[in-house]
Image (spheres, rainbow, N blue to C red):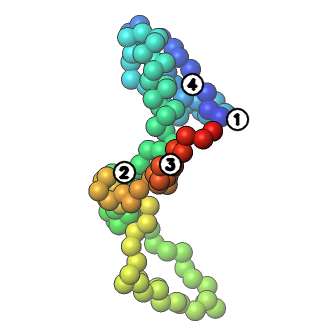
């Protein structure tokens, strides 16, 4: 089952909508709208863009996040040999999150089809 959009009136008498997961968890609450028609247009925009939106990672690097909360590792068992960490590959690049893609970086949409050569009209049906 898909999520559910609920349109409601907030404390300032403005229309808003919330997106709820199938289990009832609120996933998102919209900005205020002047009327119900504008809220419905906002829902249509979310439906259109949600599946195709790019992800921009604005969180700090993992080393910065865990630097203040370093925990001592649990003592290893005497029988377990210590292994050296694997070296990083020189050609390794971060996949998924990273720099925001720009239209010049895009190689083309997989949904676009190459234009077919026009067929020649011969006049016969």
Lower position in the chain sequence, tag 4 or tag 2: 4
Q: Report the side of 86 relative to 56 (left or right).
A: right
Q: Nearer the viewer, residue 20 or 77?
A: 20
The image quadrant of residue 45 is top left
| Cα–Cα span, label 1 and label 3 | 48 Å
**Residue on which disc 4 sits:** 5
**Pointer 4: residues within 10 angstroms few (<14), some, or many (20+)?**
some
Judge whether residue 33 can be spotted in this image.
yes
Q: Secondary structure at mark 2?
A: loop
| Place of residue 93 in the rendered image (x, y in percent of width and height, measured from the top left) | 39, 73
What distance separates the C-alpha of mark 4 from that of mark 3? Answer: 49 Å
The number of numbered discs placed on residues in the rendered structure image is 4
> Where does the N terminus fall, quadrant-wise?
top right
Mark 3 element type:
loop
Percent x, y of residue 100 = 32, 54
Label 4 to label 1: alpha-carbon separation: 13 Å
Graded by Cα atoms within 10 Å as few (under 14), some (14 to 19) or many (20 or more), the crowding at tag 3 reads few
Which residue is identified by label 3? 120
Structural distance between the alpha carbons of marks 3 and 2: 47 Å
Q: Which residue is mark 1?
A: 1
Of the image marks 3 and 2, the number of the one nearer the N terminus: 2
Q: Which residue is mark 2?
A: 56
Choose mark 4 or mark 3, whichever is in front.
Answer: 3
Q: Specify few, some or many for label 2: CA neighbours under 10 Å numbering under 14, 14-19, or 20 or more.
A: few
Horizontal side, residue 49 vs residue 98: left or right: right
Tell me the quadrant of the picture where the C terminus can be found: top right
Q: CA distance from mark 1 to mark 2?
A: 28 Å
């Amino acid at each position: 089952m898909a999520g559910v959009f609920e349109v409601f009136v907030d404390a300032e008498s403005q229309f808003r909508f919330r997106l709820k997961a199938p289990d009832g968890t609120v996933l998102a609450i919209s900005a205020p709208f002047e009327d119900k028609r504008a809220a419905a247009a906002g829902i249509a925009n979310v439906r259109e863009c949600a599946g195709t939106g790019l992800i921009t990672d604005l969180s700090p690097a993992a080393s910065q996040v865990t630097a203040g909360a370093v925990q001592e590792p649990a003592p290893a068992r005497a029988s377990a040999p210590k292994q050296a960490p694997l070296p990083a590959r020189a050609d390794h690049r971060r996949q998924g999150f990273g720099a925001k893609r720009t239209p010049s970086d895009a190689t083309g949409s997989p949904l676009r089809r190459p234009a077919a050569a026009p067929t020649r009209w011969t006049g016969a049906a």
